[in-house]
Image (cartoon, helix red, strand yellow):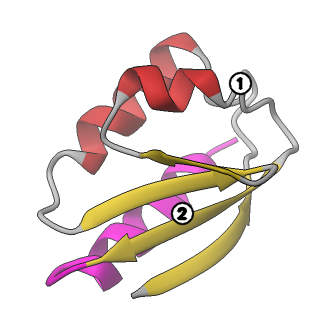
Amino acid sequence: MIERLVKVELETGLQARPAAQFVQEANRYSSHLFLEKDGKKVNAKSIMGLMSLAIASGEEVMLVADGPDEEEAISYLTSFVKKG
């Protein structure tokens, strides 16, 4: 299992379109992927879960990956939220 604290640098945060794209990319991996914010942990492959976190630009979230492609998933998803 890998955990990485990342700062969301996307201009709109993980809202609407970027959230949908994030979930779409997360679903490419077989590892279990989660996002944590303010003590709440959600499945990163769930648009409803991700939207419930209301992640704004500049906020820090914990990315958690557990599975066979966890390294690749964490690396890609970290770069995704830093595209800002």
Identify the residue at horizontal 75%, vertical 27% (top origin): 11
Q: Is residue 29 left or right of residue 34?
A: left
Q: Is residue 82 visible?
A: no
Q: Is residue 58 left or right of residue 54?
A: right
Identify the residue at horizontal 27%, vertical 64% (top origin): 32
Residue that label 2 marks: 78
For the C terminus, the image quarter is: top right
Name the amino acid, label 1. Answer: Ala
Identify the residue at horizontal 30%, vertical 41% (top origin): 45
How far separated are the C-alphas under marks 1 and 2? 17 Å
Give the numbered dot on residue 54.
Answer: 1
| Residue 71 percent coordinates (x, y) | 33, 84
| Residue 13 percent coordinates (x, y) | 71, 29
Identify the residue at horizontal 54%, vertical 63% (top origin): 78
Mark 1 or 2, nearer chain start: 1
| Residue 53 percent coordinates (x, y) | 66, 31
Q: Is residue 81 visible?
A: yes
Q: Secondary structure at mark 2?
A: helix
How busy is the neighbourhood of tag 1: few (under 14 within 10 Å), some, or many (20 plus)?
some
Inspect the magenta stretch and tell me whether residue 80 lies in it. yes
Q: Which residues are magenta?
A: 67-84
Name the amino acid, label 2. Answer: Thr
The correct choice, above or below, for 11 with respect to 60 in the image is: above
How busy is the neighbourhood of tag 2: few (under 14 within 10 Å), some, or many (20 plus)?
some
Q: Main secondary structure of the magenta part?
A: helix
The correct choice, above or below, for 37 with respect to 74 in the image is: above
Give the numbered dot on residue 35.
Answer: none
Q: Is residue 18 left or right of residue 70?
A: right
Q: Secondary structure at mark 1?
A: loop
Inspect the magenta stretch and tell me whether residue 20 lies in it. no
